[in-house]
Image (tube, grey):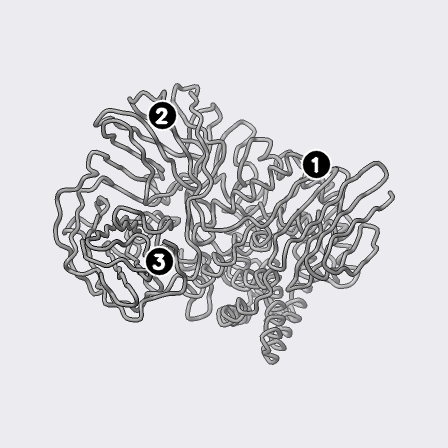
Amino acid sequence: MSLIRNKLPDVWKAKWIDPELPHESEKRQPSSVLRRVFAAAQAENAFLYITCHGLYEARLNGQRVGDFVLSPGTGDYAKRLTVQCYEVSDLLREGENELTVTLGDGWYRGSVGIDGLRNYYGKDLALLCQLEVDGKAILCSDERWEASQNGPTRENDLQQGERYDARMEEIRDWHSVTVQDFGYENLAPTESVPILEQERFDGILITTPNGETVIDFSQNLAGYTELRVTAKTGQTITLWHGEALDENGNFTQKNFYPGERNKSGIPQKITYICKDGENIYKPSFTIFGFRYAKIETEIDLKDAKFTAIAVYSQMLQTGFFECGNADVNRLFLNSLWSMRSNFCDIPTDCPTRERAGWTGDAGIFTPTAVYLMDCLPILRKWLGECRLAQGDDGLVQNIAPVNNRGGMISNMLQGSAGWGDACILVPWALYEAYSDKTILAENYDMMSRWMSYCEKRAQKTRPHNLLNPYHKYLVDEGFHFGEWCQPDVDNGESMKKTMILGAPEVATAYYHRSAALMAQIAEILDRPEDAKHYADIAENAKKAYRHACAKKGKITSDRQCEYVRPIAFGLLEGAEAQTAADALNALVLKNNFHLNTGFLSTPDLCRVLADSGHSETAYKLLLQEDCPGWLYAVKKGATTIWETWDGVRADGTVHDSLNHYSYGAVSGWLFSGVCGISLKAGKLTIKPQPSRVLGYAKAEWRSPVGIIQSAWVYEGNRLNIDISVPSPAEVILPNDEKYELTEGSYHYEILL
């Protein structure tokens, strides 16, 4: 009963069928149940091909087909709708068989995106399925099927939740279906991995100060709650899911309300109406971001059991880290859990409010993601969505798949530097980790078209920058978020400023960075003319940047990001980089070892400091317990990474998402810096940067080339280092000794 990837029927004989009767399109409908009884012989070569408008859950002779949750997954359905193929020989029996399929609203017509829009792809639900034995279709969706809206799932919405009436599980009223001509042109085989139920957490009942009964599952996650209660017919239990308790210790959802974008809020609500006796239930067509659930019920809960089930794409954990500081260990786990919570078919920003595939988030986190989990299939699928969303002019959308209808303002706020550049940054990070040129080749057209868009944008220059001799390579036009979400900077005011004055420091730096990477990519793909073209752009963009933002290599700013970025991107020359790093170090010291970098440059902050001789400062930043600092959230009890540094303020006020992976990108430095594991397109380097403040650290990366281990520990006046590599590697010890290693395990002792 396994999912088979990259497989479609040779010929579609199935028809699209709509199970619903005419209804008011704006009113939420019950789930539709479809069924077909058919005859078959037992077989060893039976495959079910299935997809839908909405979400489906299929059962063959009462047994669930596959374990894909929220199938068929998300995407721009108008352009690409994936079909799942399941091997179902073990479910098929000789004689009479029954296939039932339940459909929910899902991404197709449920609430989606930053605006909570409904009916984004259409107002219908529809099923397409074809069961083949030895390549011959023995069952197809067609006019012979029957359907009902009198099943137990009375309402369902991906964000809002479900209402389930267990008294209606035995369906008696059926009607005919309607054949629709939706075509097959947008159908594609499943190439990624399924979304699955994964870890389970038993809940603990607590009573809050205001007298409410709340379940604490101990871990913030994306998924849903399974309940087991004994009740009488008609008794109801309602669960409201949220991420936090408020400043008074009471249940709250205020931190992910989208305000003016959707005044109805996001209740993340399950309403379950019981049958008599034992009731066991978990939703099928919704997913929440939560740690807590508030209970409203008249049922006696003394024997009740509540379990949170984590739901995310099939990914093996590949990165493991531990050190002598328990808070840093928790920080690492928080990064891991925010990745799990947001890799649901595509990488999203949060599992509560927006659930959108923001390009900027993926762009800055992918170099860390490849350490933590085997995420190539998910990111590869998402890059396909970026390609589908790209404009004819080469513009890469800030969100892919696009999930808002866009007005004039929305259409203007596109193509931000650092966001659109993810179309290059993500494939490059995947290539460095997996050494697979295919990922570069299949995205090359998108990348080059984005660069063409950037070239045209750079030709336009605001009057105050026309004196720059390289102004045709200075990017100060178009919309840019800039260095988004800097501590002590108002995002709204910052956006207004960038819209008036542009964001040349950020945008030109990314123009250079993307062009420099494209020059390397073109060389790898044997495109020498392209390589020269992009190398020229990179060099001239560097000159434009230096003239506007770092004359004679000197930077004058009180913002740490304006030092981190040019150092990280190679925009400074010779001793200039060290001078800038020293100035950055001085700024951090002046700020009492607090960062003030924003969304784009924070992932590079510790690395830039440590690589330039300021590892002590990098470690003090890592261990900062005050806000803004990575351990502030840990000390507040966080089990995931927060969207903002002060997601729970000192007074206990909760705001914004508490499950965004972006700032968890620092965990990449735990591997590449603290333990020194670096894999760049097959070239393995181990260069640990130890510090007594941690006592010890050890990392294991089950990488594409094999298991890599790096560990160090301080013992008195000695530093012991143990390394294991699966292939040739260069080792650079803290005392600057270098060794060329072959596969094996190695031990080093350094006297201090």
Q: Amino acid at mark 1?
A: Gly
**Residue behind mark 1:** 324
Q: Residue at x 66, y 62 (%)?
A: 680
Q: Residue at x 34, y 43 (%)?
A: 286
Q: Amino acid at mark 3?
A: Glu
Mark 2 to mark 3: distance in Å?
37 Å
Residue 74 lies left or right of residue 734; in this view the side is left
Mark 3 to mark 1: distance in Å?
48 Å
Q: Secondary structure at mark 1?
A: loop
Depth check, front residue: 289 or 164: 164
Q: Secondary structure at mark 3?
A: strand
Among numbered discs 3 and 1, the one appearing first in the sequence = 3
Q: Quadrant of residue 293?
A: top left
Q: Secondary structure at mark 2?
A: loop
- Residue 233 in the image: x percent, y percent? 21, 27
Among numbered discs 2 and 3, the one appearing first in the sequence = 3
Closer mark to the observer between disc 1 and disc 2 = 2
Among numbered discs 1 and 2, the one appearing first in the sequence = 2
Depth check, front residue: 600 or 442: 442
Label 3: how many residues lie within 10 Å, few (<14), some (14-19) or many (20+)?
A: many
Depth check, front residue: 416 or 631: 631
Label 1: how many residues lie within 10 Å, few (<14), some (14-19) or many (20+)?
A: some
- Residue 127 in the image: x percent, y percent? 25, 57
- Residue 656 in the image: x percent, y percent? 47, 39
Viewport quadrant of the C terminus: top right
